[in-house]
Image: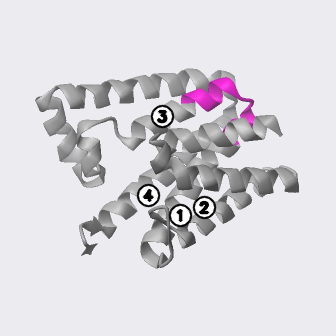
Amino acid sequence: MSVEGFSYKREVLRKIIHFSSSLFAFMLLLFGRDICLPVFIIIATLFFTVDYLRLKNQCVQNIYNIFFDIVTRDFEQKRFTGASYVFLSIVLVTFLFDTRIAVASLLIMSFADPVASLVGRTYGNLSILNKSLEGCISFFLVSVIVLVSLNFPADVVLYVSIFCTLVELLSNKIQVDDNLLVPLSSAIMLFIF
């Protein structure tokens, strides 16, 4: 089903992939930084290499398109995909922050962003900065659930969830991919508090 160029099938597939990035957070929680960071670096390096080659080599791009064209947005055809920024975020927050903060920020990225997008696209009626109020509320609520489940104090949960929601809302204006901006912002805020 498609509405004005928007494909629900494509978007749902993208969000399933986005949700699956939470596996890296759970790996980090279970196995710790020392085991996970080298694995994350290898996976990120391989993915960036393929993504770079896709941009520079038509043969690689053709092979890539066979498997991933359905989940690649039009604007990603000429730049790194959102998935590259997901892997960059995974490596950066794992390297820079303690495990609990890294896990929290990665789970916010993995769950809050796709839920907000699906809710906003499906139920969004009130627009705010080219996003929906309903999507923003969903992002906030999922962030709260993630942080509460990791036993952060109530004031930290509130401040960080509000901040991350604002960062996600403004990510288009800031022109930094939200897959990089949201986890780094949430990790920095959690570190500060």
Mark 1 lies on residue: 116
58 lies above or below 19 = above
Mark 4 crowd level (few <14, some 14–19, many ≥20, 10 Å Cα): many
Query: In x, y percent, where is residue 180?
Result: 52, 38
Q: Are marks 1 and 2 in contact (CB under 8 Å)?
A: yes
Mark 4 lies on residue: 15
What's drawn in magenta, residue-wise? 91-103
Q: Are marks 1 and 4 in contact (CB under 8 Å)?
A: no
Q: For the residue labelled by badge 1, is the local secondary structure a helix, a strand or a loop?
A: helix
Alpha carbon separation for disc pair 4 and 2: 14 Å
Query: In x, y percent, where is residue 71?
Result: 30, 52
Decide if residue 162 is on the left or right side of residue 170: right
Q: Are marks 3 and 2 in contact (CB under 8 Å)?
A: no
Q: Are marks 3 and 1 in contact (CB under 8 Å)?
A: no
63 in magenta: no
82 lies above or below 125 = above
N-term mark: 4 or 2: 4
Q: For the residue labelled by badge 3, is the local secondary structure a helix, a strand or a loop?
A: helix
N-term mark: 3 or 4: 4
N-term mark: 3 or 2: 3
Alpha carbon separation for disc pair 3 and 4: 15 Å
Mark 3 lies on residue: 87
Mark 3 crowd level (few <14, some 14–19, many ≥20, 10 Å Cα): many
Alpha carbon separation for disc pair 1 and 2: 5 Å
N-term mark: 1 or 2: 1
Query: In x, y percent, where is residue 28?
Result: 65, 35
Q: For the residue labelled by badge 4, is the local secondary structure a helix, a strand or a loop?
A: helix
Query: In x, y percent, where is residue 132?
Result: 50, 69
Task: Give the amino acid at mark 1.
Answer: Ala
Mark 2 lies on residue: 139
Q: Is residue 29 visible?
A: no
Task: Give the amino acid at mark 2.
Answer: Phe
